[in-house]
Amino acid sequence: MAAILRTLVVAVVLVLAYGLLEPYIERALYTMRLAAMSKPLALPVPVEGVRQRALRDTWGGARSEGRKHEGIDIFAKRGTPVVSSTEGIVSQVGTNRLGGLVVWVLGPGGQRHYYAHLDSYSDVEPGMRIEAGRVLGYVGDTGNAKGTPPHLHYGIYDTGGAINPYPLLKADPALIEAPAAAPATASATTSQSAAR
């Protein structure tokens, strides 16, 4: 009887521990899956309504304090939605001196996507798992862009540092991978098999 009671207590503790740790385990597994995914060959423009032909390559341009521009500026009307160019995990929602209001997203291949000079955020928060196209915030001129025409500063950071997003945004849209379909449930698979 004591062995059964001990086994039952251990089982209850394990179930409770899994219940508490499940979100962390799921996030860790998804982070590993993201890192294992291929880096995108093409990306959609992360500002709603802005077409590829409107983009200008501002990569490497001179900036204050002797810096070089590590991204692309995408101009749009203040308040235009800024959307995630990839699926991923929101790693940071905050502010910094240069970018003002910013959102960072960890995407496929471990690349980090940086959305800066936002006027405001949407309802995103760190740790959120998001799909491509999710609204992150709205075009503005915060940070060191204060007083300039509203725009999104979009940057991509790989393991070796910043990379130019312009070629990815101008690439053939047919190269943009569609989000992976969710696996079919057992009942859906069974009913599909029965229909054959």
Image (cartoon, helix red, strand yellow):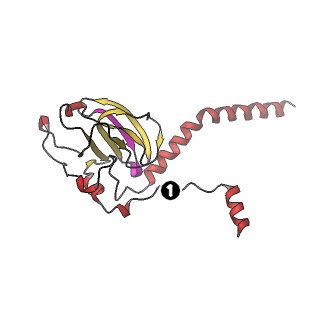
Vertical side of 68 occupied by 141: above or below:
above
In the image, residue 177 lies at what x, y percent? 42, 59
Report the residue at 40% width, 49% height from top.
86
Vertical side of 47 occupied by 92: above or below:
above
In the image, residue 130 lies at what x, y percent? 46, 43
Quadrant in the rendering for residue 62? top left
Q: Is residue 78 magenta?
A: no
Q: Is residue 103 magenta?
A: yes
Q: Which residues are magenta?
A: 100-111
Q: Which residue is mark 1?
A: 180
Report the residue at 19% width, 43% height from top.
69
Vertical side of 123 occupied by 167: above or below:
below
Residue 144 appears left or right of 14: left
**Quadrant that contains the N terminus:** top right
In the image, residue 106 lies at what x, y percent? 40, 44
Q: Secondary structure at mark 1?
A: loop
Report the residue at 30% width, 46% height from top.
157
What's the residue type where badge 1 is placed? Answer: Ala
Quadrant in the rendering for residue 37? bottom left
Q: Nearer the viewer, residue 8 or 187?
A: 187
Residue 135 appears left or right of 20: left
